[in-house]
Amino acid sequence: MIGGTLASIINEAVPDVQAVAEVSGGAEENVRLVGTGQSNLGFVISKTALQGYQGEPPFSQAFPTLRMLLSNLDIGRINVVVLEGSPLADICSLKGRRVGVGPSGHGSLANLREIFGAGCGFSFDDITPIYLPYDQALSALGDGRLDAAVLYVSPPIPAISEFGATRAFRLLPLTEAARDAVVAKYPYYLKTLIPAGAYTGVTADVPVVGTSNGLMVSADLSEELVYQITKATFENLERFRGSYPTIAGFTLEVAPQGGLIPYHDGAIRYYRERGVWPEAETRGATR
């Protein structure tokens, strides 16, 4: 829905451009699509963009043409759903369990490896991962075929809300010690919460970790075009934010912060015009 709204904004505001929103397999696939020129823009977990830019696992090659257009669109969080009667107490209880981890190729898979390893002291291989789209994983959880379903998303999302309409569930927390360990080893993680009230039955904040999400663009796009896309986005900010609840708090001020990879010169030009570009930082100056 966010991508569809952005495409409509671009089509209406940027001359001689036809934008089309396409569904992909997630952040990892988007890095490959934008990095190889098959797509021009793509939503991404910021740390996944960094891994692709540098050619670090899960990528086998670097994609040096990746550029950030905006960051901090929302914060993806690790949501671990279990049935109300589950014996599991926290995320580190997943060792040895059958766990729905999302679709194959999703950017969150690398996140799970890091969170399990740094926070819980076990590896991804210590669970039995079941690769299913989120709605199918929740269905399998409800049928007793999984012990837990992991959704790396920015809450609230319809899949969990719809699951909760027919099943009593809990969200597993990450202990404070585990959160500290993850952030200490991987500074791009944030200590965050799934807020009380995000879903029916979630009556208290659930402490977890998360990562910022953003929009990347190919360096092959001209400075002028990216400037016009950035300008159109923020001149239609209320419409853009209204496309999905998780981005309702997104602002111009946070967009140029913490992107992890260089920003496109066209985006920098717009942020400078608006007085929000952090001039003390040099990350966006590389081409």
Image (cartoon, rainbow, N blue to C red):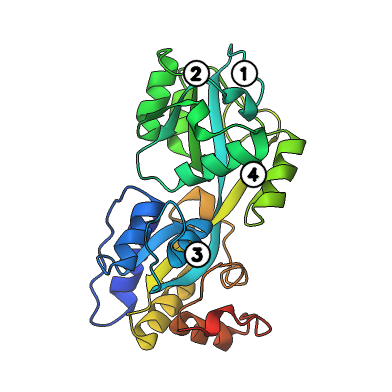
C-alpha separation, residue under disc 4 versus residue under disc 2: 21 Å
Mark 1 Cα-neighbour bin, 10 Å: few <14, some 14–19, many ≥20: some
Label 3, secondary structure: give it. helix
Amino acid residing under circle 2: Asp
Q: Which mark is residue 241?
A: none
Disc ID at residue 238 = 3
Neighbour tally class for label 2: few under 14, some 14-19, many 20 plus, Cα within 10 Å: many
Q: Are marks 3 and 1 in contact (CB under 8 Å)?
A: no
Q: Which residue position is annotated with label 2?
A: 147
Q: Are marks 2 and 3 in contact (CB under 8 Å)?
A: no
Of the two numbered discs 4 and 1 on the same chain, state the one appearing first in sequence: 1
Q: Which residue bears the numbered disc 1?
A: 88
The amino acid type, in three-letter code, at marker 3 is Glu
* Left-right relation of 141 to 222: right
Which residue shows up at 46% across the image and 72% down it? 69
Dot 2 and dot 1 residues touching (CB under 8 Å): yes
Residue type of the residue flagged with mark 1? Leu
